[in-house]
């Protein structure tokens, strides 16, 4: 966890060579349901409680070290932190009776219980290592299936609450930072092309969210009649091409429109160093620009990983956890500005000829 006392400065090498400067993380999610049980949104409280107990027992048999708990056992700040870390969804919080979460010790996997489906098995990996995330989720799925009987149809595959997930129940996605394409005015073209390829393009918080900070989640749309491994391979391949286009856009910005690039970075750094009030959305927009500058090695003292930590730290739940106090929205806006001013201490733009 970031300390409020010291500015975030990293001595680690830049992560751009591995693609993490553009591909922030990836996730593979498997939707599963128990045979003979009503889907969570249609189930009675006693039904959801029974499903939670059955899944919890299976999880502990598979991974004794997992932390399995009901979401209503967490306080509001803890729930916010889990949501902001993208370990659980806001929809899960709407099912307090029987709604649960199982967390792995290394946070490389997570299982939501009684969200839209009885199980949402999630595997995570940094960068664009989609196959690693897939292996983590698939291993957990295979192990749980030895203890639980899934709802499955020989004709359709795995049965899910939402028809769009029927079949494999698999959603493979990557979170990409595409600010270079945005500054070049080419982002809409890329998004339209992805949608024509039947890929979902969502904001940083998933379905229904806006792409604040030009951070997008790109995932498969089709789950029925397609092999799981082929879905993962396809999403990996297309996202790799998007990363290539974003990297090319950044190079073109530096060569063709350096004034636009430097102006964006200078304005963002100035606001972060001087603002007295910052909303979450505003902070994300300005930090997004600084992340681009760090990735292109145009900012002193900051690495991409530092900015990623700051993007998480300025979220409401994390900010209150760092401060150790519950705050109102207005208080968070003030303390967010104080926090980020301190973190930007000593950060400068490198000299660039424009």
Image (cartoon, helix red, strand yellow):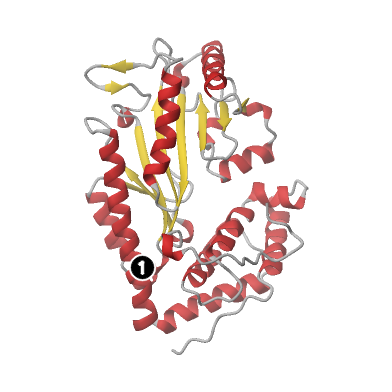
The residue lying at 42 percent from left, 30 percent from top is 139
The residue lying at 64 percent from left, 62 percent from top is 278
Q: Is residue 33 shown above or below 254?
A: above
Residue 37 location, x and y as percent? 43, 12
- According to the image, label 1 marks what residue? 247
Q: How many marks?
A: 1
Residue 50 location, x and y as percent? 54, 12
State the residue lying farthest toward the bottom: 353
Secondary element under disc 1, as helix, strand or loop, is helix
Residue 178 location, x and y as percent? 40, 62
Residue 97 location, x and y as percent? 59, 20
Q: Is residue 284 visible?
A: yes
Q: Is residue 199 visible?
A: no
28 or 266, nearer to the observer:
28
Badge 1, how many Cα within 10 Å: few under 14, some, many 20+? many
151 or 48, nearer to the observer:
151
The answer to whether residue 80 is left or right of residue 35 is right
The residue lying at 34 percent from left, 30 percent from top is 169
Q: Name which quarter of the figure residue 133 lies in.
A: top left
The answer to whether residue 235 is left or right of residue 280 is left
Q: Quadrant of the C terminus?
A: bottom left
The answer to whether residue 130 is left or right of residue 156 is right
The residue lying at 58 percent from left, 64 percent from top is 12
């Amino acid at each position: 966890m970031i300390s409020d006392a010291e500015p975030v400065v990293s001595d680690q090498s830049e992560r751009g060579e591995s693609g993490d400067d553009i591909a922030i993380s990836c996730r593979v999610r498997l939707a599963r349901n128990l045979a003979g049980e009503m889907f969570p949104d249609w189930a009675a409280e006693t039904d959801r409680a029974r499903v939670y107990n059955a899944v919890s027992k299976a999880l502990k048999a598979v991974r004794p070290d997992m932390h399995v708990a009901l979401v209503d056992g967490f306080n509001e700040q803890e729930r916010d932190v889990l949501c902001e870390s993208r370990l659980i969804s806001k929809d899960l919080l709407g099912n307090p009776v029987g709604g649960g979460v199982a967390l792995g010790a290394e946070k490389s996997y997570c299982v939501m219980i009684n969200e839209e489906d009885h199980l949402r098995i999630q595997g995570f990996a940094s960068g664009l290592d989609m196959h690693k995330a897939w292996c983590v989720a698939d291993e957990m799925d295979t192990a749980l299936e030895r203890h639980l009987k899934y709802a499955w149809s020989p004709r359709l595959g795995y049965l899910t609450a939402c028809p769009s997930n029927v079949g494999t129940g698999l959603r493979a996605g990557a979170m990409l930072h595409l600010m270079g394409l945005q500054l070049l005015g080419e982002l809409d073209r890329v998004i339209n092309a992805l949608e024509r390829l039947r890929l979902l393009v969502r904001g940083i918080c998933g379905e229904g969210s806006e792409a604040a900070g030009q951070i997008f989640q790109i995932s498969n749309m089709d789950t029925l009649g397609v092999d799981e491994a082929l879905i993962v391979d396809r999403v990996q391949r297309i996202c790799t091409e998007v990363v290539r286009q974003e990297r090319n856009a950044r190079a073109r910005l530096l060569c063709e429109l350096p004034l636009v690039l430097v102006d964006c970075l200078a304005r963002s750094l100035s606001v972060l160093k001087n603002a007295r009030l910052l909303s979450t959305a505003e902070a994300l927009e300005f930090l997004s620009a600084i992340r681009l500058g760090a990735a292109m090695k145009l900012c002193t003292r900051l690495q991409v990983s530092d900015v990623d930590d700051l993007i998480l730290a300025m979220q409401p739940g994390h900010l209150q956890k760092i401060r150790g106090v519950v705050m109102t929205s207005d208080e968070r806006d003030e303390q967010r500005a104080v926090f980020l001013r301190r973190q930007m201490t000593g950060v400068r733009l490198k000299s660039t000829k424009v």
